[in-house]
Amino acid sequence: MKLTSSVLFLAKKNMLSTKTRHKDNLDEEALRTLQERIHLHQRLYAVAKIRFYKMFDAVRKLKALS
């Protein structure tokens, strides 16, 4: 999560440093897209983590039966 907050901080800093309104609109759109992508990756990571631990638990139970 620390990487995510660093990326968002840099994106916001870049957005604030722009000069023109048109460029601000583009940067806001880019920031929104970046936030959506980060959110998607966080969800995918959470699902993968859950699946891994379910598989790990199943293997542990199989070993206990042996």
Image: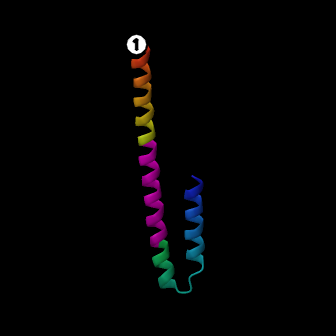
Above or below — where is 37 with respect to 26?
A: above
- Residue 25 in the image: x percent, y percent? 47, 78
Which span is picked out in magenta?
A: 29-47
Tell me residue 51's x, y (percent): 40, 36
Residue 22, placed above or below residue 60: below
* Residue lying at 46% horizontally and 54% vertically, measured from the top left: 39
Q: Secondary structure at mark 1?
A: helix
Name the spot of residue 55 as percent of width and height, x first.
40, 30
User: How crowded is the residue under tag 1: few (<14 C-alpha within 10 Å), some, or many (20+)?
Assistant: few
At 44% across and 15% down in the image, what residue appears? 64
| Colour mapping used in the image | rainbow
* Callout 1 amino acid: Leu
Say above or below: 64 vs 43.
above
- In reply to whether residue 10 is colored magenta, the answer given is no
Q: Is residue 51 left or right of residue 28?
A: left
Residue 46 painted magenta: yes
Q: What's the magenta bit mostly, secondary-structure-wise?
A: helix
Residue 50's place in the image compared with 62, above or below, is below
- Residue drawn at 58 percent across, 69 percent down: 10
For the image, the number of numbered tags is 1
Residue farthest along the bottom direction in this orientation: 20
> In the depicted view, which residue is nearer to us: 3 or 56?
56
Front-lying residue, 41 or 56: 56
Q: Is residue 10 left or right of residue 29?
A: right
Residue at 60% across / 73% down in the picture? Answer: 13
Q: Nearer the viewer, residue 21 or 39?
A: 39
Residue 7: x and y in percent read 55, 63
Quadrant where the C terminus lies?
Answer: top left
Q: Quadrant of residue 16?
A: bottom right
- Please give the residue where the numbered disc 1 appears in the rendered image: 65
